[in-house]
Amino acid sequence: MSQSVVELAKELTLALIETGKVAPEDMQDTLQKTYATLTTLKAQEESGVFAPAPISQTVPVYWRKSITNHAVTCLECGQAFKQLTLRHLGMHGMDSRSYRTKYGIPKTQPLSARSTTERRRQVAQAIHPWEKSPHIFQAREQGIHVRRDTL
């Protein structure tokens, strides 16, 4: 027995969430789009007439939707990551500054998932790196070379 369009859409959406391509917060929107696409394809299959894919119009990109609790989606290729690294952005011929400029992202906005940013904040609060810096400055004033791994 063949599956219904709703069941297929549900399975596809769950697979996208499990692979990290879609954030769980975007499940409803993805499910609706998948259902609409599958319904259109089914109607075309039944009629035997396949219309060309609609030409996508330029839609403004909302960068805020690309940063979720568990993933950040690259607006260039659509892949989901915990953090957009320089290595990945370099594959698109960009760096973080040009990426931010292109999509209107503020300089202070981290290019990482919110949970990753929060974890980094917790680690910084725990180790107090700002308390270690005066030791470096005092040592430099005295002409002593301080290695970073000794701090």
Image (spheres, helix red, strand yellow):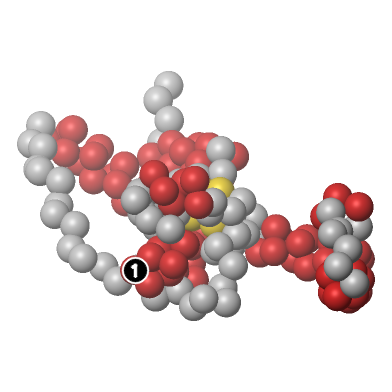
Q: Residue placed at 47% from the left, 46% from the top?
A: 88
Q: What percent of the width, then of the height, locates residue 92?
A: 35, 49
Compared with 58, 41 (above or below) is above
As drawn, is 47 to the left or to the right of 63? left
Quarter residue 131 falls in: bottom right
As drawn, is 126 to the left or to the right of 88? right
Q: Can residue 136 be seen in this view?
A: no
Compared with 79, 151 (above or below) is below
Q: What percent of the width, then of the height, locates residue 91?
A: 39, 44
Q: Front-most of 71 and 92?
A: 92
As drawn, is 123 to the left or to the right of 22? right
Q: Residue placed at 51% from the left, 76% from the top?
A: 107
Q: In which quarter of the image is the N terminus?
A: top left
Q: Residue placed at 10% from the left, 32% from the top?
A: 48
Q: Residues within 10 Å of mark 1 (few under 14, many from 20)?
A: few
Q: Front-most of 61 and 145?
A: 145
- Say what secondary structure mark 1 lies in: helix
Q: Which residue lies furthest to the top in this view?
A: 1
Q: What percent of the width, then of the height, locates residue 56?
A: 19, 57
* Mark 1 lies on residue: 102
Amino acid marked by disc 1:
Lys
Q: Residue placed at 60% from the left, 60% from the top?
A: 112
